[in-house]
Image (spheres, helix red, strand yellow):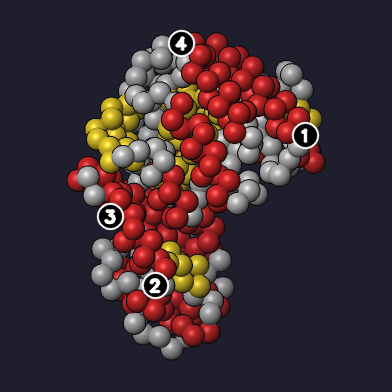
Amino acid sequence: MSVANYFELLGRDQDARVGRLTTPHGVVRTPAFMPVGTLGAMKGLHWREVRDAGADIVLGNTYHLMLRPGAERIAALGGLQRFTGWNGPMLTDSGGFQVMSLAQLRKVTESGVKFRSHIDGAAIELTPERAIAVQLLLGSDIAMQLDECVRLPAERDDIERAMQLSLRWAERCKRAFETAPEDHMLFGIAQGGDVPELRRASAQGLIEIGFHGYAIGGLAVGEPQAVMLAMIEEAAPILPEDRPRYLMGVGTPEDILEAVARGIDMFDCVMPTRNGRHGMAFTRFGPVNLSNARHADDPRPLDEASAWPSTRDCSRAYLHHLVKSGETLGAMLLSEINVAYYQRLMGDIRDAIARGTFQEFRMQTRADWARGDIALR
């Protein structure tokens, strides 16, 4: 497997980095947030809205796509981008998170994971080799190694066992990836739970194997934010300067801002769309719960200064009405508003790092969030 470097570091402000990652389907500006399209679709959004919001790259999921509609079918139909209509870069998660989240349906062995399909109960085995084969069939620009993620809190012995197993699987994934097209990438995933020395050992072990990029996994799975940030501080400085760093499954705008300050380049999370479906909007003055009765007679938009039309033009009263009435449009509007907010945040972060003003931007952004929604009155 070639481990050519497709990542260019363009600048930094202390530990915060701004860069450019070149993929077969386009360039990804970093720091980047990847909206999650688990099944090849963004819940409540069309791809054009995701693109218009400013997203360069999105995420799909190996586990779910291999079950439905099937990796071989997607390959026969031209690959994931052609199948879905998303013409930009795409990263696929290997299914390691489902190893954790579907714990009642699976058994982990040295070979891989045996589980029952959550759809029809069929017996399936996902090995490191199969995880890579599926991702190659999907044609994703960035594939992830298969790993075992442990929900926190957990016993140290279990965390170490999973971390060592993930390293052995990482080696197998790299060997399986040797048949991939040269410009496609494979990322390793550092595990180690909330144990500092295990985090460092995992990161070092992955570096010795060698990957196009490095992810930090197994966080935002039950631990406090302070623990998550502390584990980033253990792993990130060890990872190569010239490779992208991806914090998996994170997170809130505050999580992202603080992780960028610690050297992270890529993020993904279902929060923008999931919270949108439940009546929550993200704004530059913090989250707004549109289910709250106080919005019923409020003619103001969420943010009249926003560049995103739905944020700027829809009244809070109307959004409240849609949410309380259970109208599909409410979930759609709030999902696009949230995806747009996340992409605006990432763009502002990139600009601030490039100008050398990230620390000032970080403090001002946190101050705006702390002032809350009252600042818009």
Q: Are marks 3 and 2 in contact (CB under 8 Å)?
A: no
SS for callout 4: loop
Of callouts 4 and 2, which one flags the residue occurring earlier in the amino acid sequence?
Answer: 4
Bin the neighbour count of mark 2 within 10 Å (Cα to Cα): few under 14, some 14-19, many 20 and up: few
Bin the neighbour count of mark 4 within 10 Å (Cα to Cα): few under 14, some 14-19, many 20 and up: some
Question: 65 or 236: nearer the eye?
Answer: 236
Q: Position of residue 128 (x, y in %)?
A: 63, 20
> Exactly how many numbered labels are in the figure?
4
233 shown above or below 293: above
Q: CA distance from mark 3 to mark 2?
A: 17 Å
Relative to residue 61, is residue 49 drawn left or right? left
* Residue type at numbered disc 1: Arg
Mark 2 vs mark 1: give the one in front: 2
SS for callout 1: strand
SS for callout 2: helix
Q: CA distance from mark 2 to mark 1?
A: 45 Å
36 shown above or below 22: below
* Residue type at numbered disc 3: Glu
Q: CA distance from mark 1 to mark 3?
A: 47 Å
Residue picked out by circle 4:
1
Of callouts 3 and 4, which one flags the residue occurring earlier in the amino acid sequence?
Answer: 4
Of callouts 3 and 2, which one flags the residue occurring earlier in the amino acid sequence?
Answer: 3
- Is residue 217 at all visible to an observer of this figure? yes
* Residue type at numbered disc 2: Arg
* Residue type at numbered disc 4: Met
Mark 4 vs mark 2: give the one in front: 2
The quadrant in which residue 325 appears is bottom right
